[in-house]
Image: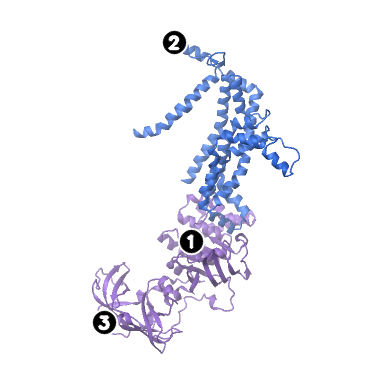
Chain colours: A purple, B blue
Amino acid sequence: MAANAPVAEAGAAKPASAAHKPAGRTPAPQSNFAPWKDPAKQPIVRFENVTKRFGDFIAIKNCSLDIYEREFFALLGPSGCGKSTLLRMLAGFEKPTEGRIIVGGKDITDLAPYERTDVNMMFQSYALFPHMSVEKNIGFGLRQDGMAKADIDVRVAEAMALLELEKFAARKPHQLSGGQQQRVALARAIAKKPRIMLLDEPLGALDKRLRQQAQFELMRIQETTGTTFIIVTHDQEEAMTVASRIAVMNHGELVHIATPGDIYEFPQSRYVAQFIGDVNVFEGKVTSIADGSVEIDWPAGGSSFTAAAVGGLSTGQQVWLAMRPEKVRISLSKPTAPCNTIPGKVIDVGYLGSISHYHVRVASGQTVTALRANSAQTVEQNIKWDDDVWLEWPYDAGMVLDK
Amino acid sequence: MRRWYVIGAPYLWLLLFFLVPFFIVFKISLSEIATAIPPYTPTVDLAEGWAGFKSFFSQLDFENYAFIFSDPLYVGAYWSSVKIAAVATFFTLLVAYPVAYGMARAPKDWQATLMMLVILPFWTSFLIRVYAWMGILKKEGLLNMFLMNMGVISEPLTILNTTTAVYIGIVYSYLPFMILPLYSSLEKIKPSLLEAAEDLGSPPWKAFWQVTFPLSLPGVFAGCLLVFIPAVGEFVIPDLLGGSDTLMIGKTLWSEFFNNRDWPVSSAVAVVLLLVLVIPIVLFQRMQQRQQEAAS
């Protein structure tokens, strides 16, 4: 099942069908898999008002979260935001100071890690046992359960086949490359067939190429085993690629929980908008709201914008209009179509091959980034440094944020 | 050329301070006791030239070795030394392991202080510390007084001048040599390994035997050898704390040398002791080599 539609492209060009009239904005469904929208569904993991303090430091602030079966759930945030603490509480290595953790309808708050049979974790540093061969490492968890040797051998062989590790069965961890070690760590946890797999920065130690491969590998394994995966990462691209839903965390709080597409296109705050991808932000005031669209005065630039209205806005309120760079068009002449336009001067051009970045200084003095796909095969850039240009974007391409 | 100086220096050192003395001792062990200065024969008479050397070598034999192995006193002393050293090493391991484990798990900023405390006894002379144990263990000593005052015992225990006192002395004296290698191997074990073991369903006590202990084995081996090797030849502890029934080769060697003034036999005893100890030393080196291969 398509639990993880390839949402990495969500950040690419807006589909042409997106109309210019700024009305009726509803998030487009990424896939049919959305158990969080079904009120009858019971979550497999539930954090209930969980708070965790280390001395005076509050690592997790009154956190409530439901995760559903077969989800690939990502906890995303900068280092120190508490995402690892949340995961470690689920594994049992940390006890919540307040609140409860419920797995499959059972309160597991007070269970020790080895009693939590539904949950297994893949560690950031892999934590492979250096004195055991790959085979013994993978079989370790099964031996703890007192399983018969023949059954252990079958399960270990299964796990090794799933991760293409058969060739390395007799090797010790130090004889493996980083990518192979990562797969052994995954196989060791998967061999226990947990209902919930926890992955703590599982790909952090791999180089970029290998990481991208491993992301798709993780998705493949999650789909074939049907296990619920919860991944902790600080890499927003990784979260976007693999996850069915993402929880963005900051200072021990869950600031936004949604699908990758919704988080990217409809962030609820400037923090989330800036954390996920690049964004241009204009600060302004609401001057009028009508017909599902809102007028925003932008005093710093001496101009005003039109955008799609969101709930809870009132006239005179301070808001921020956030714009993804790929939605900003750049041209040498003033556009005639009805859309938001501002003039500016190119101060920097970054040519990346597939796309080019344009940094444009506008009237307010701030720099606005516009992206353009280099669809024509030419090394000639028709927009150069110090060119006077026009930036434009459709009325419904901006996100109005009130915090 | 300069490389040879660097490599040559330790070899020259070994040659001068180990091999040359060893061959002198070995030569004496092949000689015979004599009432002379030095108290053995033959000696080389350089004035006689080549003939002198020939008659010198013709008089050397292995009679002392034959004597040592035919006399149950010496064989018994070797055997009981190895036994006492082995038992004492085991008890040292039992005491040292929890201490080393505690040190390795202590907060990082305490570890240097704890290490200092372990090494601290070396600041006092070894001899004085062993004498202090005589004061503690004797009939009217601190331990007996304490136990009697507490009402644990009514009659003082005889500990001093028994093999038990020797065990206590060895365990106490060699404890740091066991703790330090244990600590260094325990400290290297990543806490995440134990978390992984627990996560995979292993309760903490089981995780200890499955993960911590096997990974500390290099430290266990190193510590055991560092205690066992010197303990076999130990003289001071059995002499001061042990009784007449505590038979150890160090004591035998001493009485052979100073009481009987039999240099050739005591030299032979020393050479055999060296051979007995070479076996564990070779084992130790093999072990270290394997470890280095595993690390690289």
CA neighbours of label 1 inside 10 A, class few (<14), some (14 to 19), many (20+)? many
Foreground: disc 2 or disc 3: 2
The local secondary structure at tag 1 comes to loop
- Residue A355, position in %: x, y? 32, 70
Whether residue B289 is situated above or below residue B43 in the rendered picture = below
Q: Quadrant of residue A334?
A: bottom left
Which amino acid does the dot numbered 3 rest on? Lys
**Residue on which the image places disc 1:** A202
Q: State the residue lying farthest toward the right.
A: B154
How far apart in space, not on screen, are marks 1 and 2 (Cα)? Answer: 82 Å
Return the residue nearer the eye: A179 or B2: B2
**Residue on which the image places disc 3:** A334
Looking at marks 1 and 3 on the same chain, the residue that comes earlier in the sequence is marked by 1
How far apart in space, not on screen, are marks 1 and 3 (Cα)? Answer: 48 Å
- Residue A343, position in %: x, y? 27, 79
Whether residue A140 is situated above or below residue B68 in the rendered picture = below
The local secondary structure at tag 3 comes to loop
Q: How many numbered marks appear?
A: 3
Which amino acid does the dot numbered 1 rest on? Pro
Q: Quadrant of residue B265?
A: top right
Image quadrant where one finds the C terminus of chain A: bottom left
Whether residue B37 is situated above or below residue A252 in the rendered picture = above
**In which chain is the residue bearing label 3?**
A
Which amino acid does the dot numbered 2 rest on? Ala
**Residue on which the image places disc 2:** B47
**In which chain is the residue bearing label 1?**
A
**In which chain is the residue bearing label 2?**
B
Q: Is residue A132 visible?
A: no
- Residue A307, position in %: x, y? 38, 83
> Which residue: 53% across, 70% down?
A61
How far apart in space, not on screen, are marks 2 and 3 (Cα)? Answer: 118 Å
The local secondary structure at tag 2 comes to helix
